[in-house]
Image: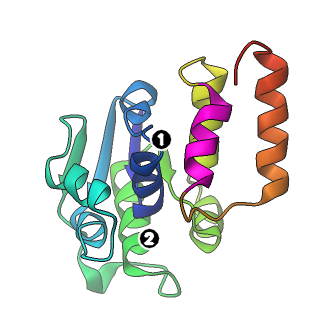
Amino acid sequence: MLAVADAGPLHYLVLADAIDLLSRLFTAVLVPQIVRDEISRAGTPALVRDWIADPPPWLQIVPTPSLETLPFPKLDIGERAALALAMSQQADVVLMDDRRGVAVARANGLVSIGTLGLLDQAAARRLIDFAAVAARLTATNFRYPPDLLDVLLARHQEENPGDG
């Protein structure tokens, strides 16, 4: 499966020490250059900047589509580039947390999965202990609907009562 990633899921999976899940869930992950640039900025945590400075082989940084032709003007440039790349590459999924971006993706026929959705899928495949990774994620500045996290924690505790 081919995925295109926006900055959010990459940023938070690195901080939660779960970034390698992407290589286990997808055959390749494409990132527009402008998204790479976003997570390389000085305000980004050093751990994330160091990771993107030396990306793993399964992560492919690709040129940003022409800014003049990027659709979806109400989204930020990284989300616009990720959506345009996903559409042009016929990606199986776009990895994005921004609610407006997710809505635009789905309205344009794209499958969109956010950070919590990725962790949910990984836990369902028994690739992670959901509670442990969720604890690391929530220790960051990641914003999430608490009710959703509660549902996911309960689901994975039910499915794996010996975990977390």
Residue on which disc 2 sits: 79
Residue at the image point whose x is 80% and y is 15% from the top:
161
Query: Is residue 113 in view?
Result: no
Residue at the image point whose x is 33% and y is 42% from the top:
29
Residue 147 in the figure: left or right of residue 92: right
The disc label shown at residue 92, or none: 1
Residue at the image point whose x is 34% and y is 57% from the top:
88
Residue 150: image location, x then y, percent: 83, 45
What is the CA distance from the residue labelled 1 to the residue labelled 2? 16 Å
Query: Is residue 56 in view?
Result: yes
Could you say which is closer to the camera, residue 107 or residue 147?
A: 147
Which is nearer the N-term, disc 1 or disc 2?
Answer: 2
The answer to whether residue 136 is magenta is yes
Q: Would you call the spot at circle 2 few (<14 residues within 10 Å), some (14-19), or many (20 or more)?
A: many
- The amino acid type of the residue labelled 1 equals Asp
> Mostly what secondary structure, the magenta segment?
helix
Quarter of image, res 46: bottom left
Residue 91: image location, x then y, percent: 41, 45
Quick one: SS at disc 1? loop
- The amino acid type of the residue labelled 2 equals Glu
Could you say which is closer to the camera, residue 140 or residue 22?
A: 140
Residue 140 in the figure: left or right of residue 34: right
1 or 2: mark nearer the eye: 2
Magenta residues (range): 129-139
